């Protein structure tokens, strides 16, 4: 696993967690929200492996499949 970045802890992140909201929605201009968006952009540019090479890839593959099924089920 390669280092992709970090999300700084700031007061806005704590406030969003306390309000049970995503920091990128509640405080989109905060340092933590900006860092999360940058991290998401980096991840979307990763090339998808053609075959899994290790345990973490199997875990991530199952997690992504599970999340996509949940989105289809939710109204």
Image (cartoon, grey):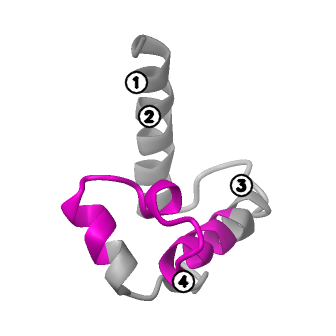
- Quarter of the image for residue 12 reads bottom left
What is the x, y in percent for residue 70? Answer: 40, 24
Residue 67 numbered tag: 2
The residue that appears at 24% across and 57% down in the rendered structure is 19
> What's the CA distance linking mark 3 and mark 2?
19 Å
Residue behind mark 4: 31
**Magenta region, mostly helix, strand or loop?**
helix
> What's the CA distance linking mark 4 and mark 3?
31 Å
Which residues, given as a range, are shown in magenta?
14-40
Contact (CB < 8 A) between labels 1 and 2? yes
Label 2 CA crowd tier, 10 Å (few <14, some 14–19, many 20+): few
Label 3 CA crowd tier, 10 Å (few <14, some 14–19, many 20+): few
- Total numbered labels placed on residues in the image: 4
Q: Earlier in the sequence, mark 2 or mark 4?
A: 4
Residue behind mark 1: 70
Q: Earlier in the sequence, mark 4 or mark 1?
A: 4
């Amino acid at each position: 696993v390669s280092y992709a970045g970090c999300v700084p802890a700031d007061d806005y992140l704590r406030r969003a967690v306390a309000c049970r909201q995503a920091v990128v929605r509640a405080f989109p201009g905060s340092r933590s929200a900006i860092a999360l968006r940058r991290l998401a952009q980096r991840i979307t540019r990763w090339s998808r492996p053609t075959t899994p090479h290790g345990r973490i890839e199997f875990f991530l593959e199952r997690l992504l499949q599970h999340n996509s099924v949940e989105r289809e089920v939710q109204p």
